[in-house]
Image: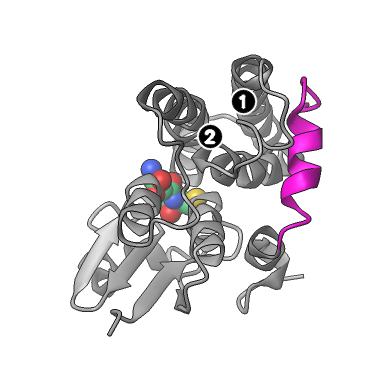
Amino acid sequence: MTDALVLHGFWRSTASWRVRIALGLKGLAWTGVAHHLRLGEQNAPKYLALNPQGFVPALVVGDDVLTQSMAICEYLDDVHPEPALLPADALARAKVRAAAQVIACDIHPVQNLKVLKMLRKRGLDEAAANAWAAEVIESGLSAFAKLIEGNDGPYCFGNQVTLADIVLVPQLGNARRFGAKFGFGRIAAVEAECMKLPAFIDAAPDKQADAEG
Ligand SMILES: N[C@@H](CCC(=O)N[C@@H](CS)C(=O)NCC(=O)O)C(=O)O
């Protein structure tokens, strides 16, 4: 029997969105618990007991809890190897991880809600904070586009959906939200291909039970 999967997330959270895509690609059933980030529900003691960082997502797997979206996606890939989210070849895996980490380590953490709140607390107004986020996203995505440009596609790294696609599509949601440019290289074409797949369609923020208009 497989463990029940409970995803603690938020409809608009890009890190939660990554995990929803991975769960969908693996064909896994899950239930969701929403934590409203603007209302600060991620900092409620009950949730901090699951993730002391006060970040979504957290994935409850039976009696265990996993945090960090990339670790969760790789766990799902380890336990449910098909379809693989990473290529078999070590060099190719490192390239996929590198592209994914451009977004997961170098773009997203610099423009997430916590950082934007800190900037506002230090005097940046809404427009300046959004411009900060847009600049971070644009410079990161233009580098991401170069990292994937040698591949034919249709996805970031050939004809297999990988972790790179799983982080790219949600990050484009943030790009739109903050008015960042993202039409670099093959990025828009990759997104269009991904959005033909049910796992990506079903994971979209506006499809979630807690989505707001
Ligand atoms: N590296 C973490 C990042 C998680 C993260 O930043 N989550 C955001 C939503 S996308 C969050 O919970 N923010 C709450 C806050 O900033 O207070 C992961 O990949 O899981």
Instruction: Please name the residue that numbered disc 1 is placed on.
Output: 132
Asked if 131 appears above or below 22 in the picture, the reply is above
Q: Is residue 209 left or right of residue 187?
A: left
Give the residue displayed 56% in from the left and 66% down from the top. Answer: 24
Q: Residue furthest front?
A: 89
Density class for disc 1 (Cα within 10 Å; few <14, some 14-19, many ≥20) is some
Q: Name the residue nearer the viewer: 23 or 143.
A: 23
Look at label 2 and name its amino acid. Answer: Gln
* Horizontal and vertical percent position of residue 180: 74, 30
Image quadrant where residue 2 sits: bottom left
* Horizontal and vertical percent position of residue 136: 59, 23
Q: Name the residue nearer the viewer: 121 or 116.
A: 116
* Horizontal and vertical percent position of residue 179: 77, 34
Density class for disc 2 (Cα within 10 Å; few <14, some 14-19, many ≥20) is many
Q: Is residue 34 left or right of residue 48?
A: right
Q: Secondary structure at mark 2?
A: loop
Asked if 109 appears above or below 5 in the picture, the reply is above
Image quadrant where residue 97 sits: top left
Q: Name the residue nearer the viewer: 141 or 5.
A: 5
Give the residue displayed 35% in from the left and 54% down from the top. Answer: 72
Is the N terminus in the top left, top right, bottom left or bottom right quadrant? Answer: bottom left
Is the C terminus in the top left, top right, bottom left or bottom right quadrant? Answer: bottom right
* Horizontal and vertical percent position of residue 118: 44, 37
Q: Residue furthest bottom?
A: 1
Look at label 1 and name its amino acid. Answer: Trp
Residues in magenta?
180-197
Asked if 99 appears above or below 60 in the picture, the reply is above
Determine contact: label 1, label 2, CB under 8 Å: yes
Instruction: Please name the residue that numbered disc 2 is placed on.
Output: 111
